[in-house]
Amino acid sequence: MTNNKGPIGIFDSGIGGLTVLKEVLKMLPSEDTLYLGDTARLPYGTKSEETVIKYSIENTRFLLKYNIKLLIVACNTASAVSLPVLRKQFSIPIVGVIEAGARAAVRATKNGKVGIIGTDTTISSSAYTKAIKSVSPDMDTVGQPCPLFVPLVEEGWIDDDITLSVAERYLGPLKNKDIDTLVLGCTHYPLLKGVIQKVMGSGVTLIDSAEETAVEVTEVLMRMNLNPPYTPFSKGGEVNVPVRRFFVTDVPRRFEEQWSRFLGEKLSKIEKIDLIL
Ligand code: DGL
């Protein structure tokens, strides 16, 4: 039996995946959603593949306790290394952020040259390159890790000269590679779109994998008949308000400020949980 009434589960290493949730809520406002941010073990982007896979399995097991109907791995690093294992181990549909971003990049490029930026682990996994080439084998890709972008976004230095210098340093080598499309392969990078576009110039199309993932989730739900029937009112006549729950494994300092930066709204009620009990 299809579980079209269950919530959508989303996890990320922290609160960066809220950029994905934000796009999902725009497209699917009546869906119930459960977000898990593994803030206690962040960052994933500098950890080994083995560790990221272990964490991803634990996050998925936690969300499955709530009978989720679909899982979004809203972390590029976790998507890059753990999707095949998760899909083998769990039977619900699982959407990562990489395949959607790869397809959008192939659609956008005119000269077949695509750049990819992400964390160290994402770039060294070559997951984007593999995904892009599986859509279109003739594509030329070039990857560039930009590890300092994550702490700069968390610090709130979005439109700052220091961020601009860091971006010039990281993106300089890509500018000589004649790419016309650049994939923002990390949950934090959509917040730096302005700076990245400034450095790359208006001739380069930026691909935001958060937006593309929301499109893919919508398509998967429709294809699998997993959309809930639209019921604006309950039997009693009250307005049905979609459930939105937020779980985190730690509440770090300055959490509130960072939260609103990513989701574009104030910190809602969050539930601190322990994944390993
Ligand atoms: N969420 C991670 C990603 O998209 C970035 C933060 C981290 O390194 O954990 O790759």
Image: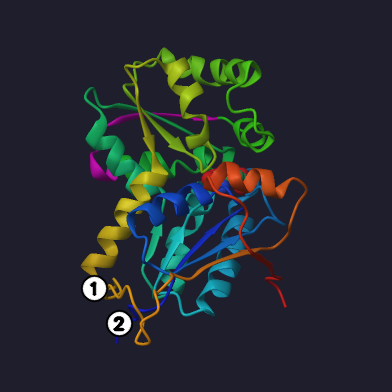
Mark 2, residue position: 2
Mark 2 CB in 8 Å range of ligand 1? no
Earlier sequence position, callout 2 versus callout 1: 2
What residue is rendered at 47% in x and 24% in y?
194
Nearer to me, 214 or 45 = 214
Q: Quadrant of ligand 1?
A: top right
Q: Position of residue 198 (x, y in %)?
A: 45, 17
Mark 1, residue position: 225
Mark 2 and mark 1 in contact? Answer it, CB < 8 Å.
yes
Q: Secondary structure at mark 1?
A: loop
Q: Quadrant of residue 197?
A: top left
Left or right relative to 172: residue 1: left
Q: Quadrant of residue 24?
A: bottom left
- Amino acid type, callout 2: Thr
Nearer to me, 265 or 49 = 265
- Amino acid type, callout 1: Asn
Nearer to me, 139 or 117 = 117
Q: Does the segment drawn in magenta span residue 168?
A: no
Left or right relative to 118: residue 150: right
Q: Position of residue 141 (x, y in %)?
A: 36, 30
**Disc 2 packing (10 Å; few <14; some 14–19; many ≥20):** few
What residue is rendered at 47% in x and 49% in y?
80
Quadrant of the image containing the N terminus = bottom left
Q: Secondary structure at mark 2?
A: loop
Please, is residue 206 above or below residue 40 in the view?
A: above
Quadrant of the image containing the C terminus = bottom right
Q: Which span of residues is magenta-colored?
A: 134-145
